[in-house]
Structure formats: C-alpha cells, structure tokens
Amino acid sequence: MKEEYIISPLGDSALLIHLGNRIDDGLNKKVLHLFHTLQQLSLPEIIDVVPAYSSLAIYYDVVSLHQKNATAFDAMKNLLKPILEAADGQSLSTKRQVKIPVCYTKMYAPDLEALAFDKNLSTKEVIGLHVAITYRVYMIGFIPGFAYMGKVDSRIATARKNTPQNVAAGSVAIAGEQTGIYPFASPGGWNIIGRTPIKLFDKEKEEPVLLQPGDEIQFYSISQNEFENYQGGPS
C-alpha cells in the first residue's frame, strides 16, 4: 500500500491502521474496501475487524500469531503487509441508497428552534438544508446501530451540547458536521431536530443493524400524522 498509513498497537491483542485523521469520503472508501477484503479472506488469526472514519481496528488471536522471534503485533503487521500492498489505491465502489422519513414537528424536534435561532435561519430553512444533502454513513458506533453520517451543510453545523440529555429512539440529530439517528432511547449530547419512525436496530433480524458503513442516506420530511401512522420501512 504505497499511500501513507500508520499501524499502531491497540492494547495487546489489536492494532489500528490509520489512513488519516479527517472526515473524507475517499479515505472512508479505502477503509471500507480493506474491511470487506479482510472479511472475505476470513483469516483465522483475525477475530474481528471494525471500520471507522479513516482507520480500521483489527482484533487478532495472540496465541495463533506466536512466533519465537516476533511479537504478535509484529507478526500481524507482517501478515497484513501483502494485503495492504494489494489494496493500494483501491476503494469501495458499491453503495446502497436508503431514504429515511423524518418528522421535524416541534414535539419531535426539541432543539430545532434553538439551532435555527443560533444560525439566523428559520426552522423551515434548517429542515430544507438537512434534507437537501445525500449523507454517507462513515461508521457505526457509540451504541448498536448508531450511524455517523456526514457532512451536513456548514450553515447548520453546530457544537454538541455541554450536558447530555435523555433522547428518544429514532431521534435525528446534528453535532459538528455530522448527523445521526439514535436507535434506542439513551443519553445523548447531539442537537435533536426531528424523529424517524424507522427502526434502526432489530434484534429479531438476522442483520439487526439497518444502516451500514458506505450507505448513502437521503432524509425526507413527513408530517406528524404521517409519522404517527407510518407502517413502512426505509425505501
């Protein structure tokens, strides 16, 4: 892999492959290409692979990597070297497009008016800017099914709250340049601007997490009545 990357230890049984330190579509596509490559190879030494914005965590079996003159970390790096070289310049080309309905009515959007006031915009303008962009799912984290998406229009980018509050399941939120959806009721510090009736996590399904890294997400506005009577799924 000729492009710049850094491999660093992550505890005593994992490592991180860093491709950069920024929110960038190109870097994320390279991370996901490597992620899918390692999944397909199913190397017995690798226990799990976890993609992030611009890095990939690899958890490995220390015992299977035991060598007389090398640590497990060095052995894993040597095992990855030809895979990284083969992945040079490659990026994930496949993508799934998902449309998510959102109700931006005040009762489901407790922070929408404050955000609009802070940005010198109307709530209608904030909603328009939020639905105008197709967002990329960069990673899943924080809690199962929480998709980190970006980037929002700079005119509605806003800082996290200083104090986390209880957030309802399905809440659509903004923090910094990112937008996301809370799959469960949980504490959260993002600014809530709407709510979706779509279930983001379903433990009864074979694949419980709805959104996946690399997905392209388009939000669209629905009324309170449509929200309360919604019967479908994402489109």
Image: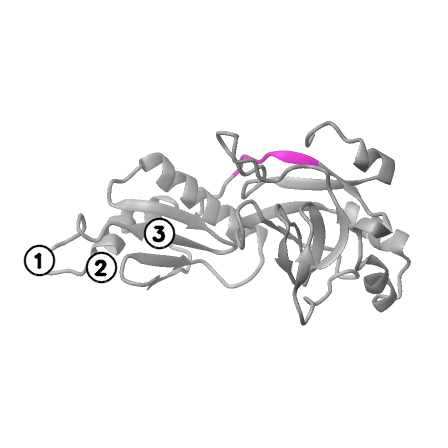
Return the mark for residue 58: 3
Cα separation between marks 3 and 1: 22 Å
Left or right? Give the position of 51 relative to 198. Answer: left
Number of numbered discs present? 3
Identify the residue at horizontal 48%, vertical 29% (top origin).
206
Image: 41 above or below 20: above
What is the crowding at mark 3: few (fewer than 14 residues within 10 Å), some, or many (at least 20)? many
Identify the residue at horizontal 78%, vertical 60% (top origin).
156
Cα separation between marks 1 and 2: 12 Å
Q: Does label 3 or label 1 sit earlier along the sequence?
A: 3
State whether residue 127 appears in this view: yes
- The reply to whether discs 3 and 1 touch (Cβ–Cβ < 8 Å) is no
Residue range of the region highlighted in magenta in the rendering: 93-99
Nearest the eye: 1 or 141: 141
- The reply to whether discs 1 and 2 touch (Cβ–Cβ < 8 Å) is no
Q: Amino acid at mark 1?
A: Lys
Residue marked by disc 1: 68
Q: Position of residue 94 (x, y in %)?
A: 54, 34
Image: 18 above or below 171: below
Q: Callout 2: helix, strand or loop?
A: helix
Identify the residue at horizontal 89%, vertical 51% (top origin).
124
Q: Position of residue 183 (x, y in %)?
A: 62, 45
Q: Position of residue 42 (x, y in %)?
A: 31, 37
Left or right? Give the position of 24 relative to 190. Answer: left
Residue marked by disc 2: 74
Cα separation between marks 3 and 2: 13 Å
| Residue 79 counted in the magenta span | no
Identify the residue at horizontal 79%, vertical 49% (top origin).
108
What is the crowding at mark 2: few (fewer than 14 residues within 10 Å), some, or many (at least 20)? some
Q: Callout 3: helix, strand or loop?
A: strand
Left or right? Give the position of 75 relative to 85. Answer: left
